[in-house]
Image (cartoon, rainbow, N blue to C red):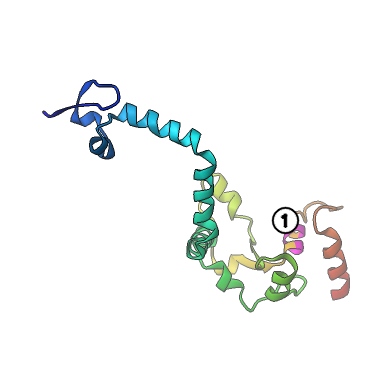
Amino acid sequence: MDEIKCGSCKIIKNVNEYSKSGIKYKKCKQCKSEQDKKYAIKNKEKIAEYHHNLWRNNTERKKSNRLYVSKIRFGLDADNFVKGKSCEICGMTNQEHLDKWGERLNINHRNNKGRRAMKVGLKPDNNIDNLQVLCRACHCKYGNSKEQNYTGRGHKIWETRKQSMI
């Protein structure tokens, strides 16, 4: 078998103890790892900026990630699912929701087997009949509707919209 002398520690080691880039620079895995750690500590801010720019400047990556996450949660493209729809409780449109909160309408699992099911390792029930479109305030109220005197986030908005619908 081939043996190479490490350029850093000067020990002759088997080729298997070198990474692909290590052979190129004549550094064993251990020396290369130590060098990488020192570089990461020394250039921490530079590396953080590099990774930050990957997301900030790459809109395609953001879109594909958002689509991937929505397909896992709901089994469909959530942005297209809510397009042209309105909140099933108060009637707020998707465009009004975007203007007010800067995000699309929420998708709720009627039988509550969505993210909670995923947390315990179960498959979410993403049947179209099980999904409903809700605004942020109604989604919050709907999730806490078991409490009789709900006073959490969005309760005032919910109450005023509910009164206007009566």
Most common SS among magenta residues: helix
Q: Is residue 33 above or below residue 94?
A: above
Q: Is residue 117 left or right of residue 143?
A: left
- Rendered location of residue 126, percent (x, y): 54, 62
Q: Residue at x 33, y 27 (%)?
A: 31
Q: Residue at x 20, y 24 (%)?
A: 13
Q: Which residue is mark 1?
A: 143
Question: In which quadrant of the rendered image does the N terminus lie?
Answer: top left
- Rendered location of residue 165, percent (x, y): 84, 75
**Within the image, what quadrant is residue 27 found in?**
top left
Tell me the magenta residue range. 137-141
Q: Is residue 6 left or right of residue 134?
A: left
Q: Residue at x 75, y 63 (%)?
A: 138
Q: Residue at x 47, y 36 (%)?
A: 40
Amino acid type, callout 1: Gly
Q: Is residue 13 left or right of residue 74?
A: left
